Amino acid sequence: MSEQGTIDVTDCKRCADLVESRSQIVNGVGPGDADLLFVGEAPGEQEDIEGEPFVGRSGEILDSVLAEYGLDRETVRITNAVKCRPPENRDPTATELANCRPHLEREVAGVDPAVIVTLGKVPSEHLLGRSVAVTNEAGSVESITIDGTAYRVLIGLHPAATLYDPSTRETFEAVIDEATELVAGLR
Ligand code: URA
């Protein structure tokens, strides 16, 4: 099992804007050897205050869908592609994503999850290295290689998408269902 200490970012000043906008670095939470690793975009206001990913409105949605499929937040790992809150919750820039990539790669390698589930367009495109139409491609599984190791990536929606368009809730649920099936099949 990976030690949390080896995965956590304790200090980073690579992004001048984010050093200004953040109250703290928001590291991933959950077991250091979780089967499922959820990767979001970047912390929002509440996450920046509490120092934990997905604890605001998006987190409530994520938690409730996880619970529908028998998953507890404590048993999965949840993180973000960028660990600091961007100003005014803007999307992280390509440079910020690139600056934070070594932290994410260290986390992925340490956790060594059976499945990485991307939450939305930004982390999907960042991890897959191509443009992704998340609504159409949600539920697709692709392989990526990080430092010589292959990982399965399951494309998912951002939980907030279900707020803007409630008809996407079904797709969001189907992705979580598929994630649990994939993990069960790999055990
Ligand atoms: N949205 C994200 O992408 N990450 C969070 O931690 C919260 C909201």
Image (spheres, grey):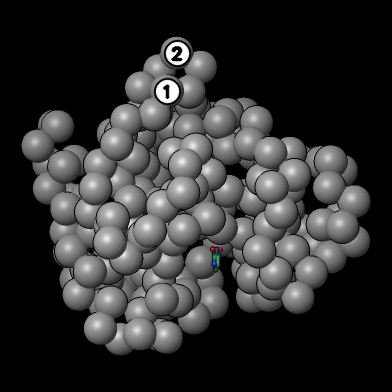
| Label 2 residue SS | loop
Q: Quadrant of residue 139?
A: bottom left
Across and down, in percent, residue 75 comes to: 33, 51
Q: CA distance from mark 2 to mark 1?
A: 6 Å
Determine if residue 183 is in view.
Answer: yes
Residue type (three-letter) at the residue carrying disc 1:
Thr
Is 14 situated left or right of 69 in this image? right
Residue type (three-letter) at the residue carrying disc 2:
Gly
Do the numbered discs 2 and 1 sit on residues whose CB atoms are within 8 Å?
A: yes
Within 10 angstroms of label 2, few (less than 14), some, or many (20 or more) residues? few
Q: Which quadrant: the C terminus?
A: top left
Is 38 situated left or right of 97 in this image? left
Within 10 angstroms of label 1, few (less than 14), some, or many (20 or more) residues? few
Q: Which residue is mark 2?
A: 148
Across and down, in percent, residue 93 comes to: 71, 54
Across and down, in percent, residue 174 comes to: 18, 64
Look at the picture and state if 10 lies above or below 23: above
Instruction: Give ligand 1's quarter of the image.
Output: bottom right
| Label 1 residue SS | strand
Report the disc number at residue 145: 1
